[in-house]
Image (tube, rainbow, N blue to C red):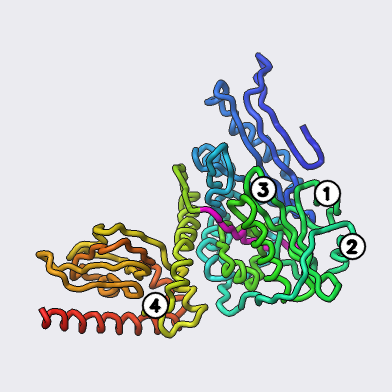
Amino acid sequence: MFSDDTLVLVAEDSDSGRVLGTASVVLEIGALTDLVGEFGRLAVHPDGRGKGLGNLLMEGRLERVLDRLHVGLVDGRVTRPFTQKISQSHGFAPVGFFPMLAKFGRHRESLAWLVQYFGDALELRRNHPRIVPEAYQLAVMAMENVGIHPDVIVDEESAAYPHVDGFEVQELSTAGYSDLLRIERGRVRRREIFGPLSLHYGFFKIKAQRSDYLIARQDGRTVGAIGFTRDELEGTVRVFEMIHLDDEVIRFLLEELERRYREWDVTGVQIGVSAHAPRMQRTLVELGFLPAAYVPAHAFHRVERVDVITFYRLLAPLELGEFKLISPTKEMAEVVIKGFARREVFPELRQAVGRIDLFAGLTEEQTMRVAGSCTHAKFAAGEPIFEHGESSSKMLLLLRGEVERLLPGGCLAGLTGAGECLGEVALLTGAGHSATAVARSEVHAGVITREDLAALVRQRPDIGVTLYRNLAEAVGSKLQRVDIEHRDA
């Protein structure tokens, strides 16, 4: 069964006439004729399992879209490995993972993204994208998975778009539609956000697809707009376009949309960003978004295909539940999950920055880079954190609470409080802990591993110089304090 934008296949038992399986492809999910298709749900009736119907339906889909697509995407459920196995066996490769994106009944499930290319897609790819460091590991893994030599350039210098006020906001109307169409810069010449819709689709089609624009006006003229789709059933928002006359309105529109979706029942927000737009990437990271997928040659722009990083903001606590992943989807998911686990420590780190000795002398940007290498940990009062002599590859930055350091035999060696480091000597030297650490009260801490610290210092030697100086001073101060405490005892 064909329509202009959808292919549906069914597997029918030739003897009984029963339909035992079905599969679909949405042939155009990109804007501006991106030639991107979504391989939708593949379902096989229990009576048809074990007969190769899943493979037959997947092969049938691939055969029928070869001349119609450049990029095929699979949204794979992760509670069962069937989708991952059949997709990977037919040439799809994992490029992303979205925690808690889809709603099934009362529960939310994570989804894996897998991609396959057709025709000249990769030959048309624009090379050497410029990306923020937070997206580097994901980008390299995605490129290697699809067979591309990683050619990304890490951009440490590009600043986020500035926060500027003074704009009026209104929703899209037929009267404002023509004003937006006249704005060329940002919409076509320097396109930074990509999605499944675009302004040229027409006012009524945009509204029919539950989409809207917030329009920014200044001194009576339209200066920019942000297009988004709100899915009330899924509880998600997807930004698909940014239109702007100048850079000053960009962050304002993103923050204005944030004010609105925080009032809605929204769990996640997605934004697809050009891998050649580091300023937009940096802005989204500052606004709480994290890279969740990297799709090479995802969108067609002018005469070439550009890589797209899909940034994702999770507005609910990270509760993944059970899922089953196979390699290399498993490794991709681990990279993304680690980023979201780190993000949970950001609010407390921001509040505690002035009290954390490790951050002394760092700029705000450098501090946020260190914070981005931390995960979050909590310990109940009386809970052991590590034992005397135990080797460790991680250090704790205490954000809240106190920790007792106990010598063998239970003698109190000292207290470590909020703003101080714990386990830094073991981290730096690889030796076992000199004391047992027990939470005296409920403790909240940022955790940084030796591996993550080494990676950060390799990428940013300027941060490493300050960190190691602060660590040396902290160790010296702690040893002096222990000596004084022992003399007093």
Q: Amino acid at mark 2?
A: Ser
Foreground disc of the pair 4, 3: 4
Residue 139 magenta-highlighted:
no
Do we see residue 178 in this rendering? yes
Q: CA distance from mark 1 to mark 4?
A: 53 Å
Amino acid on which the number 4 mark rests in the picture: Arg
Say whether disc 4 or disc 2 marks the residue closer to the N-terminus. Answer: 2
| Magenta span main SS | strand
The amino acid pointed to by label 3 is Gly
Query: Gap between marks 2 and 3, in whole Å?
Result: 33 Å
Q: Who is closer to the viewer here, 235 or 152?
A: 235
User: Local crowd at mark 1 within 10 Å, few (<14), some, or many (≥20)?
Assistant: few
Q: Is residue 456 left or right of residue 301?
A: left
Where residue 89 sits: x, y (%)?
A: 55, 41
Q: Residues within 10 Å of mark 2 (few under 14, many from 20)?
A: few
Residue at left offset 16%, top offset 83%: 484
Q: Is residue 187 left or right of residue 312?
A: right
| Residue 293 falls in image quadrant | bottom right
Q: CA distance from mark 4 to mark 3?
A: 49 Å
Q: Residues within 10 Å of mark 4 (few under 14, many from 20)?
A: some
What range is drawn magenta here?
Answer: 299-316
Which label's residue is closer to the chain start, 1 or 2?
Answer: 2
Q: Which mark is residue 205?
A: 1
**x 43%, y 79%: residue:** 354
Check if mark 4's residue and mark 3's residue have beta carbons within 8 Å.
Answer: no
Q: Are marks 1 and 4 in contact (CB under 8 Å)?
A: no
Mark 2 sits on what residue? 178
Whichever of callouts 1 and 4 sits on the residue coming sooner in the sequence is: 1
In the rendered structure, find residue 72 and report the number of the disc placed on it. Answer: 3
Please report the residue visible at 55 percent of the width from the left and 56 percent of the height from the top: 314
